[in-house]
Structures are given as structure tokens and as C-alpha cells.
Image (cartoon, coloured by chain):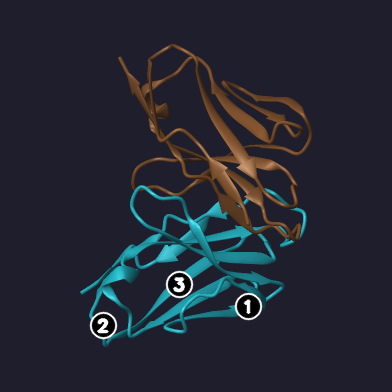
Amino acid sequence: GQSLEQPSEVTAVEGAIVQINCTYQTSGFYGLSWYQQHDGGAPTFLSYNALDGLEETGRFSSFLSRSDSYGYLLLQELQMKDSASYFCAVRDQTGANNLFFGTGTRLTVIP
Amino acid sequence: DTEVTQTPKHLVMGMTNKKSLKCEQHMGHRAMYWYKQKAKKPPELMFVYSYEKLSINESVPSRFSPECPNSSLLNLHLHALQPEDSALYLCASSLTGDGTYEQYFGPGTRLTVT
């Protein structure tokens, strides 16, 4: 089976940096994605890591360590609009593009 | 156009009703998905269509019936639902169903079964 564990809640101050961790167990690994979902909204794609290392996209960066079955999403210069739920996701064991989502982290940005 | 649209936005139905959810995309994507999301939980995959063929049915009850009339449209037919089926139903699409990692989600249909 597959499992992806994330902290359930994180609170951070506007302008700060926050890291959201994701540890995974899956029999076949094809990469780790991150999605953001605001309350009442649709999940939106943020980033994808297939190989070890850091991928940077503006204020957001994502890191992957395949040997540790671990990744994280780093949000810099936090803004109030970053308050949302963040999900890591893996493609399933067959390699098809069927996403299995982590438990989700609710990020609250405070002034 | 990078939009996935879903109708209706909200739906209330009784346990004996039959209704349908609709999803549409015009990005030329060839894979489309239905997810179910309960409050404060992650989306759970229900169905996958790849090139208009049902490729995955994640052991979903038969009271949910998907249909893909063409590459741009996806329907989810609902019949004899239970109150526990109340959830947000999300549609998504991706360029292909194999090797593409970004899925585009619609805003969802909030379903309440009474």
C-alpha cells in the first residue's frame, strides 16, 4: 500500500519561512508532487520532484530525498494568502498518473 | 484556457434521486479523473479515464457511475446515494494518463445527500 504522512497543522508569521514535511511509503516511487488548496477551492499544482534535490519556483521550493523517503515544501516570505491546506502526493505504483494524496497540512499565516 | 469547469456547484439530493455531475475541459487533455473529498481530508481517487476509456475504478460502489462521452467531457451519474456520500466531488484532467504529473482540478461540486 501507500501512505504519506504530514503534520496536520502549522502556524507561521507573515514574512517568515515555513517548511512542511512529507514522509512516504510506497512500493513504486515515481516522484512527489505538492498541491495547495484554499478553503472551498480546488487543489492547484505547486511543484514536482522526481529526483533528489531542491526545486525552486518563486517563493516556493520543494525538496526530495529518495533514500530517506522524505520531502518538504518550503514557503518563503509568507503572505496571508498562503493560508491554505497543502498536500503532498505520489503517483501510484503502476506509474500511471493516478495521484495518492498525503494527509494534508493546514497552514495558518498570522500577522 | 487552463480551466476545468464543473456543474453544478452545489447539489442536494434525496437517497432515492438520480442526478449527474458534469465536468468539462478544453485543454486537449486525454486523461480525466473523479475524486471524492470529505471535510479536512485529502482527495481520494474514484475513477480515471484515459483516452476516453475507463482505466481505473478504485472499488467505488455501483451507485456511482462514470461516463466519458468525449475527450472534453466527464460525467458522474448518481443513484440511490447514502448520507455518507455527502462530500466535495472534484474533477481533474491531465495531458495524458501516463507520465504526466500535473493535474488541473475543477472547483468541485458540493454534494449533500439527505
Write down the quadrant of residue A74 in the picture: top right
In the image, the chain rendered in cyan is B
* Residue drawn at the location 26% of the way across and 82% of the way down: B15
Task: Name the quadrant of the C terminus of chain A.
Answer: top left
Question: Outermost residue, left direction?
Answer: B114
Kind of residue sitting beneath label 1: Asn
Kind of residue sitting beneath label 3: Lys
Do marks 2 and 3 share a chain? yes
Write down the quadrant of residue B110 in the picture: bottom left
Q: What percent of the width, then of the height, locates residue A26?
A: 68, 49
Q: Check disc 3 and report its element: helix, strand or loop.
A: strand
**Which label is found at residue B15?**
2
Q: Circle 3 is placed at which residue position?
A: B22
The answer to whether marks 1 and 3 mark residues whose Cβ atoms lie closer than 8 Å is no
Chain A drawing hue? brown
Q: Which chain hosts label 3? A: B
The answer to whether marks 2 and 3 mark residues whose Cβ atoms lie closer than 8 Å is no
Q: Circle 1 is placed at which residue position?
A: B70
Q: What percent of the width, then of the height, locates residue A91?
A: 68, 52
Closer to the eye: label 2 or 3: 2
* Residue drawn at the location 50% of the way across and 59% of the way down: B44
* Residue drawn at the location 33% of the way across and 52% of the way down: B39
Q: In this rendered view, identify the residue nearer to me: B35 or A21.
A: A21
Q: Which chain hosts label 2? A: B
Callout 3: 10 Å neighbours few (<14), some, many (20+)? some
Instruction: Answer left or right for B75 relative to B31.
Output: left
The mark that comes first in sequence, 1 or 3, is 3
